[in-house]
Amino acid sequence: MKVSDYIVKFFEEKKIDTVFGYLGGMITHLADSIAKNPNVDFIQVYHEQTASIAVEGYARENGNIGVAIATSGPGATNMITGIADAYFDSIPALYITGQVNTYEYKYDKPIRQLGFQETDVVSLVKGITKYATMITDESKIRYELEKAYFIAKEGRQGPVLLDIPMNIQRAEINPDILEGFIPDEKKEKVYDLEEINQLLKEAKRPMLLVGGGCINSNSQTEINNFVERTGIPVVSSLMGKGSVDETKDEYMGMLGSYGNRCANIAVANADLLIALGTRLDTRQTGAMVNEFLRNGKIIHIDIDEAELENHRIENKVNIAMDAKKFIEKLQKETLNILEWKTYLKDLKKNYNQEKEIEKNVKNKAPYKLIETLNKYSKEGEVFTGDIGQNQMWTAQSLILKKNQKFFTSGGLAPMGYSLPCSIGVAFAKKNDEAIYSINGDGGFHMAIQSLLLISQYNLPIKVIIMNNSALGMITQFQELYFENRLTGTVKDGGYILPNLKEIASAYGVKYYKVTETELSDESLMKNIFSQRNCLIDYQIEGESRVYPKLEFNSPLENTSPKLPEDELKKLMIKC
């Protein structure tokens, strides 16, 4: 059997039915082997970065590992953004790069390059993968595939990379005599959660914070059951959106720098925070880490012990455990927190995102669009968010219904994420449920080639461009810190857009240009939402801002536009 055929057989056995990539000379053997296997499809994605991000959507949707392939040199380097993104957001993915023949590779020779397009991709990605190696012996193919797959899925998940020279891909092997990989047995730490359960019972103002680890561990059902049985109030991080049914009264909103005001104030007043599957980065806590939950205790649960040990927050108990396993072991009795819940009900009533928009947002057009998505979207549908203002408008105001999902990038946050991610989700779902790819105009332009896949495969993706003809998030920084010099972010600063209607036509996608006023046209909206796929060019006129926003050196509860000092003081519970 040829090595490349063996690799594809391995994919089939692991139920990986889709491989994303872009063809190049050093990966042709593998691509041809995929073509010969009826149970594995190759999706040509027109740019390797699209492939490397699409596998994230594929993995996040179906819980399996995602696979992307690329040729040596520029093919491999084009995938690096997606590899890094998968690493920082803990997404299990296998990246396979072709390499020049072993007899053309420079190894330790003091030269820059021997073979054409030869690039030491393993060294390039060492810091953004859990495992990366070049296979120089065809007899090691089973061992390396099994090892890479195990490492990608084990513990805190993440990407792995195998660099396979062309002569290794075409080599003949006997599968029956190949050495397999046997992982070392790891003893799982055993925690007595009696103390945690006792702290929870005794807490007067408990709060649950759900992070991205809750999504990665597929613990949504357990979390929703826990919230329903105990009545514990809950907030989410950006990456934790979708962990809990957001239509429930217990959900206070998203926490953090662009979090909902009521969620931030609620956490600031808690006396016990169960931080589940989140690393508590400064986008959640604010830069004033010592002021975060200053009158309470934190139970910090993360599968990665290193994240727990290397943290500036001190008032916490660390538990290195999978989010799903932890939540299953917590007591499920109803908590005696009626006074706390009454306070939170009033807080949510008066300081929810709708009130924020009403009081502080002049240009309401972006939020009106998300309000429309809340109205017309259905259970089971998926949203993918890009980076920039569009991400925060969506995260702040999108109310996820039962079984809805929201995928975005948190750690690396590359513009151009949403569209390829939605492609991966579509190939994983394989049904007619709608996927909404939400983009800013800048991020859309970066991923524009992905649009062709929607018409090519008739994917159920509605591409939404929140079009303010600017790099809006950066304009907020320029206004705050650079005297409103809008270099590179608006037309006068050198930033322009192509004609999106003509772009849609060229890529074979139905186009709609929509204004804020037209959102109230029910006939038009029903027509748009009935489409299997389309491009919605949503016009946002004038200056657009994201509020609330936490400014540097402000505590989490004091987001801008800031509340009057006496009003904020009344909201803070005296301990």
Image: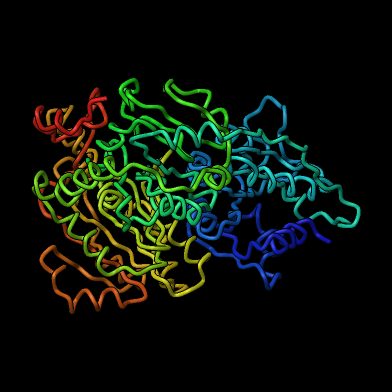
Q: Quadrant of residue 492?
A: top left
Please provide percent x and percent y for residue 113.
64, 34
Q: Residue furthest right?
A: 177
- Give the number of callouts: 0
Image quadrant where one finds the C terminus: top left
Residue located 20% across and 30% down the image: 572
Residue at (19% x, 45% y) in the render: 346
**Nearer the observer, 322 or 122:** 322
Task: Report the coloring of the rendering.
Answer: rainbow
**436 or 112: nearer the viewer:** 436
Residue 158 appearing in the image = no
| Res. 171 image quadrant | bottom right
Left or right for 86, reference 64:
left
Report whether 516 appears left or right of 123.
Answer: left
Q: Position of residue 155 (x, y in %)?
A: 62, 40
Q: Is residue 140 visible?
A: yes
Indicate the quadrant containing the N terminus: top left, top right, bottom left or bottom right. Answer: bottom right
Closer-to-camera residue (430/164)? 430
Residue at 78% from the left image edge and 56% from the top image edge? 3
Q: Position of residue 37 (x, y in %)?
A: 70, 70
Image coordinates for residue 52, horizontal then vertical, percent: 52, 51
Compared across the picture, whether 478 is left or right of 304 comes to left
Q: 238 or 113: which is nearer to us?
A: 238
